[in-house]
Amino acid sequence: MYMVVSHWKPLPGKESEFEEKGMKARAMLKGVDGLTFSEAIRSGDEIVVVHAYQDYDTYQRLVEAEDGEVAQMMAEVGIEASGEWLGSEKGETIER
């Protein structure tokens, strides 16, 4: 499994809008084949979003590809109009 932990900061005065757009985006993502988990938490003044994909190739196809389904959905929702992406940690999960 390939996981991504992204850190976002809502823009001043747009906190509620950012959360609404985030909920809409996660609802849209629930049906995407290869995306196994998507959740968000508040941590101080940041929103931390955790996504899990079947594997790295699936992540590349859905997110990093120019026509990736997840990338297109995020643009459609307009998440960056109300929040600033601060960065992400990414990697394969450690198997037992």
Image (cartoon, rainbow, N blue to C red):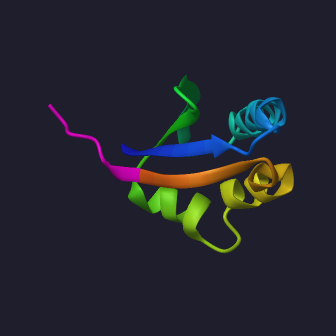
Question: Is 71 above or below relative to 43?
Answer: below
In percent of width and height, residue 51 lies at 51, 40
Decide which of 45, 92 is in the foreground and name it: 45
In percent of width and height, residue 66 lies at 66, 74
Decide which of 69, 49 is in the foreground and name it: 49
Q: Is residue 5 found left or right of 74 in the rendered image?
A: left
Q: What residue is at 85 percent from the left and 55 percent from the top?
A: 76
Q: What residue is at 60 percent from the left and 53 percent from the top?
A: 85
In percent of width and height, residue 82 lies at 79, 47
The region drawn magenta spans: 89-96
Question: Is 92 above or below relative to 17?
Answer: below
Question: Residue 56 occupies which quadrant of the picture?
Answer: bottom left
Does the stretch in magenta take in 81? no
Q: What residue is at 76 percent from the left and 49 percent from the top?
A: 79
Question: Residue 9 occupies which quadrant of the picture?
Answer: top right
Q: What residue is at 81 percent from the left and 29 percent from the top?
A: 16
Question: Residue 28 occupies which quadrant of the picture?
Answer: top right
Image quarter in which the C terminus is found: top left
Q: Total label count?
A: 0
Decide which of 13, 48 is in the foreground and name it: 13
Name the residue at the left extreme. 96
Q: Is residue 95 found left or right of 68 in the rendered image?
A: left
Decide which of 58, 91 is in the foreground and name it: 91
In percent of width and height, residue 49 lies at 55, 37
Does the stretch in magenta take in 92? yes
Image quarter in which the N terminus is found: top left
Name the residue at the front extreme. 12
Question: Is 15 above or below relative to 65?
Answer: above
